[in-house]
Structure formats: structure tokens, C-alpha cells
Image (tube, rainbow, N blue to C red):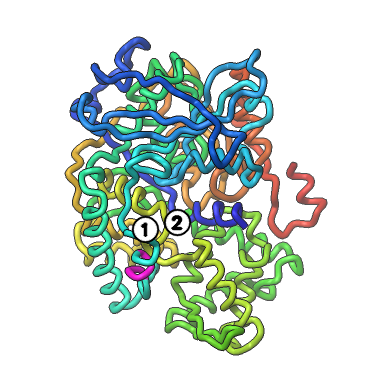
């Protein structure tokens, strides 16, 4: 269940941002022996590793870095680190720093899951033998301190989110969401103060360079996923001569992420809403081709899904739970959870996800007091308690996500402009237009003193190639973003996983092996090479085996 929740929650968050202190946009390659973080006077900290209290397979440490690199001797913040030590020290190549993305996901927790066997490793045993795998929680995130926060406790977050829709489609729903967004932005400022003004991607890139120096590495070796690819792009362009072997998995387009046509959001510029629609269409195609192996839709899953949405747009259906209590089944819940399970195709045909979930929804709509409705009611309550299909503001990564995103990206300046954009995007992407637009709706009332944004160039030529990997059908970071970044980086190679889902290493052993070969011996995939996915949803075992 823990892996299910982790994979599903990747769904709400895929994109983010860029930043840079005065002059950073003009910074060229820096000599290897230049100041750590690119700022004179920043002390290189000494790392004191010790066994982590709760995960003995890991070692933990912390790193102090300046809160404000313009004042390197002023206040500091502390970054939390975790390390899986190289299994074969005699053949050790160095350190590989991992960023899980978000922004807001904890790399420390990610390594904990890998070490404990609850999350799949993005690298092979050979990489684990030859590299120290280092996870760093970026400033303000996860176990780093202070951590950005907007609520005193989970109950306060739940109270604000009660009755607030992720996908507001009526005037009352939009008004309620706008009021809650304003209150949320205000609470974030009250709880986190000036920390909000210093959670920037450029500061995080400088932090990575301080960490590189503390690890004793002349160059940073790095694996970034989703937003982590954006952060890696900033590092590679700010600290080009210090860039070692970089692997980018599931690419955020840095130019389109940050700015574009006035009144647009990151999701509309990148096209993650359209990518979500295309991935859903692939689900329909594979479901139909799977015949009886897909329980949803009676041969026409697209029509069955459209019927579900048509019913729920008219208002929630009250399901009678096994305890007799009414549980609302809403348009917002079905769209939100569908937008999440699309991230991981292994969930497309398991109980609670994909086809089984939609089949249950269809039955519950027909008979809200029946057995299927009672089972679905229990599932909704259980999933929301576990963080799946949750209302706005309640995910623990949201404060960091909005702090970085709202301070660094352009977006609609009014609720009216946001509403118009959502309607326009629905015309292109179906329900995912509004879902993705409202991921950043708190940015309308958000206020930040941050003026630091990295605006390019994005065309660094690194000594070592950057390996770029992406799924063909990724609902968050579309393949066209990977192709654009491949074109930006003068020394890069693109590897496409011919499958579905977010974070290609979680979908294809071939991707993991290709990235690992590059990290260990510098061998890149052939130009134009592609990987097959491990899973073909709804396929017969014979077809699925042929993909491996």
C-alpha cells in the first residue's frame, strides 16, 4: 500500500520552476576550484555521517547552507541528507546525488523506501556497488529544517479543504475554491514567514554545489526525476564545469514551465493536461484491446467514462456505506484519482485503480445503495485517509510545491482569468484541463518577495553527456518536453521508453539498465534507441513477456 500511495501521489505534482539571484542568469561556467555555491565566503561544511535512527541500512547527516546567498554569513538553513554507502568501496566511483522531484518530495524518504525494499531502485546493483547514493531534502522540504508549513496540524488543513473541489466546475465551487486559496496563501505566510522568500530553485542549485564540495567531489553526479530534471538543468547551466554524469528522468521543459503567453499556467504551457488526456486515451485503447481482461466499459471504455463524468457533473451521488453513512461520490474525486492512477500503469488493472475502480463507479452510480456502492464508499474513505484523491491543501508536499511554483512561474493574475483558462483548457484536454490549471490556483493570491529567477541560457555544453529518458505517454511530463530539452543541451542523448506512466525508471527495467551503464562506465544508448516497458496493461502474458 505504501508504494501504491507513493506512486499515486506523484499524480498531483509534476512541474516546477526556476530561479536565480541577481546576475545568476549571466553566470558562465565556473572553474572547479571556485567558491562553493558560486558565492565567495560560503563555508564548505564537514559531513558527519552516522546510522539513521529509523533505517539502519542508511547513514544520515546534515548540511548548513546560507538562507540567503546574498548574505552568506547571515542566517542558515539545514539540509537533511541520507546515504546508501557503496557496497564495493574498492571500486567506488564517487557520490550520486538523487532528487525525487515535486518540488516537495523527500529524497531522504525515497532512499529509505529503496533501502527497505518498499520502493523500486532507479539504478542497478552495479551502481549501488560503485556509488554512494545520496538523497538530499532541498531547503524547506521534508526533513530539512526549518521546513515550510501552512498549518498547525493535519486537522487544520482538513478543515480548510472540507468541501473544496480539486476540479471546480460550478460557480459556487469556484467561489469556494477562490476563498480557500486566499486563506491558504495567507496561512502559509503566517506559518513560514520569510522562509517562503528563499525557497528558490537557484538557491537549491547553489545548495547542491555546496553539497558537492562537502562530499569531496570535483563534479556533481546527479539523477533527477520530474522537477529534479528542472533543478538539474539550472545546475548544469550555472555550474557547467562542475557537472559530471547527469541522468534526467521525466523532463520538465524549463522555458515553458516558467513563462509564456500571459494568463497561462505551467500545466497549460507544458501541455501536461493534454498529456494526461492522451494517456487516458491509451488506457481506453489498451482496455478495449484487452477484451475480457479489462472489466470496464463493455467494449467501449471511452463512452462509459464519458457517461460517468456526465452524471457526476450534475452533482455528487451519495453512496450508502456499509455502516449506513452517506459518502459523496463527486466529479472531482473521479477526475482527481484518475489523474493520479494514470501515472503508474501497474495500477490500471488492480483493485482500487484503473478499470476495476471505474467499473465500481459505474455500478455505484446505477445503484447508490447496492453492494458495489458500499465497497466504493469504504474505498474512498480509506484512500483519502492514505492521501489518494485528497482535496486541496492536505498533501504534505503542497506547501513546498506552491512556495516554489508561485514564486517562480508566471500565471493568471485574477480568479476570472484562471476560470477562463480552465474552460479553454477543458476544450483541449477534457476534465484534465481544469484539474491541472487548479493545481496552481493558490498562486493567484500568493505574495512573495522572491525576485530570483533563472531565465537562461539553457544551452550549456557539459563535458559529460546528459542522459535524458522519458516515457512516450507520460501524463505529467510529456515526451515533447524531453525532445525540446534534448535540443537545448548540446551534449545530450535521448532515450524513449515506449510505454506509459511517470518516471520512466519505474516503468522499464531497460531504462534502469541503460541509465546505470552510463553512470558506471559512461556508455550511452545508441542514437535513436528505445526501451520497452515492463508492463503492457490488459495484455496477455505472452504479449507482456515480449516487451521485456
Q: Earlier in the sequence, mark 1 or mark 2?
A: 2
Q: Give residue 478's position: percent from left, percent from top.
A: 48, 47
| Prevailing secondary structure of the magenta residues | helix
| Residue 279 locus on image (x, y percent) | 55, 56
Secondary structure, mark 1, is helix
Left or right of residue 79: residue 496: right
Mark 2 burial class by Cα count in 10 Å: few <14, some 14-19, many 20+: many
What separation in Å lies between label 1 and label 2 (alpha carbons)?
7 Å
Q: Nearer the viewer, residue 543 or 33?
A: 33
Q: Is residue 363 visible in this depiction of the protein?
A: yes
Whether residue 484 is visible, yes or no, is no
Residue sitting nearer the eye, 399 or 257 = 399
The residue indicated by pointer 1 is 439
Q: Residue at x 51, y 63 (%)?
A: 388
Hey, which quadrant is residue 255 in on the image? top left
Q: x, y (%) of residue 85?
A: 59, 26
Q: Is residue 160 magenta?
A: yes
Which residue is located at x 31 percent, y 22 percent? Answer: 37
Which quadrant of the rendered structure holds the N terminus?
bottom right
Q: Are marks 1 and 2 in contact (CB under 8 Å)?
A: yes
Residue situated in front as seen by the camera: 496 or 102 = 102
Q: Quadrant of the C terminus?
A: top right
Q: Is residue 402 left or right of residue 452?
A: right
Span highlighted in magenta in the image: 157-161
- Label 2 sits on a secondary structure element that is helix
* Tag 2 residue: 12
- 446, above or below 486, in the image: below
402 drawn magenta: no
Residue ID at (51%, 71%): 334
For residue 439, above or below residue 460: below
Amino acid at each position: 500500500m505504501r508504494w501504491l500511495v507513493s506512486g499515486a501521489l506523484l499524480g498531483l505534482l509534476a512541474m516546477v520552476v526556476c530561479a536565480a539571484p541577481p546576475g545568476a542568469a549571466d553566470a558562465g561556467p565556473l572553474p572547479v576550484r571556485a567558491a562553493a555555491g558560486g558565492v565567495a565566503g560560503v563555508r564548505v561544511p564537514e559531513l558527519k555521517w552516522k546510522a539513521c535512527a529509523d533505517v539502519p541500512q542508511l547513514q544520515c547527516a546534515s548540511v548548513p547552507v546560507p538562507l540567503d546567498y546574498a548574505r552568506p554569513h547571515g542566517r542558515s538553513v539545514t539540509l537533511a541528507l541520507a546515504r546508501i554507502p557503496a557496497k564495493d568501496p574498492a571500486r567506488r566511483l564517487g557520490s550520486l546525488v538523487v532528487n525525487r522531484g515535486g518540488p516537495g518530495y523527500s529524497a531522504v524518504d525515497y532512499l529509505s523506501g529503496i533501502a527497505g525494499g518498499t520502493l523500486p531502485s532507479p539504478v542497478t546493483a552495479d551502481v549501488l556497488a560503485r556509488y554512494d547514493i545520496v538523497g538530499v531534502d532541498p531547503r524547506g522540504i521534508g526533513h530539512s529544517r526549518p521546513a515550510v508549513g501552512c498549518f498547525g496540524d493535519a486537522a487544520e488543513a482538513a478543515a480548510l479543504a472540507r468541501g473544496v473541489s480539486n476540479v471546480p466546475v460550478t460557480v459556487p465551487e469556484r467561489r469556494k475554491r477562490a476563498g480557500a486559496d486566499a486563506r491558504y496563501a495567507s496561512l502559509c505566510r503566517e506559518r513560514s514567514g520569510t522562509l517562503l522568500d528563499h525557497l528558490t530553485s537557484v538557491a537549491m542549485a547553489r545548495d547542491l554545489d555546496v553539497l558537492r564540495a562537502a562530499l569531496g567531489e570535483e563534479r556533481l553526479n546527479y539523477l533527477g526525476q520530474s522537477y529534479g530534471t528542472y533543478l538539474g538543468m539550472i545546475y548544469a547551466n550555472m555550474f557547467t564545469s562542475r557537472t559530471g554524469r547527469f541522468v534526467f528522468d521525466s523532463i520538465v521543459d524549463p522555458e515553458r514551465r516558467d513563462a509564456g503567453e500571459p494568463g497561462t499556467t505551467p500545466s497549460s504551457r507544458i501541455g501536461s493536461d493534454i498529456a494526461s488526456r492522451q494517456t487516458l486515451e491509451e488506457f481506453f485503447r489498451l482496455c478495449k484491446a484487452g477484451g475480457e481482461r479489462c472489466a470496464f466499459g463493455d467494449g467501449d471504455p471511452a463512452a462509459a467514462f464519458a457517461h460517468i463524468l456526465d452524471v457526476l457533473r450534475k452533482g455528487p451521488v451519495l453512496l450508502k456505506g456499509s455502516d449506513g453513512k452517506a459518502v459523496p461520490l463527486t466529479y472531482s474525486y473521479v477526475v482527481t484519482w484518475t489523474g493520479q492512477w494514470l501515472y503508474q500503469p501497474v495500477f490500471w488493472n488492480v483493485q482500487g485503480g484503473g478499470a476495476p475502480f471505474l467499473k465500481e463507479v459505474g455500478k455505484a452510480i446505477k445503484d447508490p445503495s447496492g453492494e458495489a456502492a458500499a465497497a466504493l464508499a469504504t474505498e474512498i474513505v480509506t484512500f483519502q485517509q492514505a492521501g489518494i484523491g485528497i482535496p486541496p491543501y492536505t498533501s504534505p508536499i503542497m506547501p513546498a510545491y506552491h512556495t516554489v511554483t508561485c514564486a517562480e512561474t508566471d500565471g493568471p493574475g485574477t480568479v476570472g482569468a484562471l476560470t477562463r483558462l480552465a474552460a479553454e483548457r477543458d476544450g483541449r484536454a477534457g476534465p484534465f484541463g481544469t484539474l491541472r490549471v487548479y493545481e496552481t490556483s493558490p498562486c493567484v493570491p500568493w505574495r512573495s518577495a522572491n525576485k530570483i529567477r533563472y531565465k537562461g541560457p539553457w544551452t550549456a555544453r557539459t563535458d559529460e553527456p546528459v542522459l535524458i529518458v522519458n516515457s512516450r505517454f507520460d501524463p505529467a511530463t510529456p515526451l515533447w518536453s524531453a525532445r525540446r530539452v534534448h535540443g537545448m543541451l548540446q551534449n545530450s542523448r535521448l532515450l524513449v521508453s515506449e510505454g506509459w506512466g511517470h518516471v520512466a525508471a519505474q516503468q522499464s527495467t531497460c531504462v534502469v539498465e541503460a541509465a546505470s551503464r552510463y553512470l558506471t562506465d559512461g556508455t550511452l544508448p545508441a542514437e535513436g534507441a528505445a526501451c520497452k516497458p515492463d508492463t503492457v496493461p490488459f495484455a496477455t502474458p505472452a504479449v507482456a513477456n515480449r516487451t521485456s
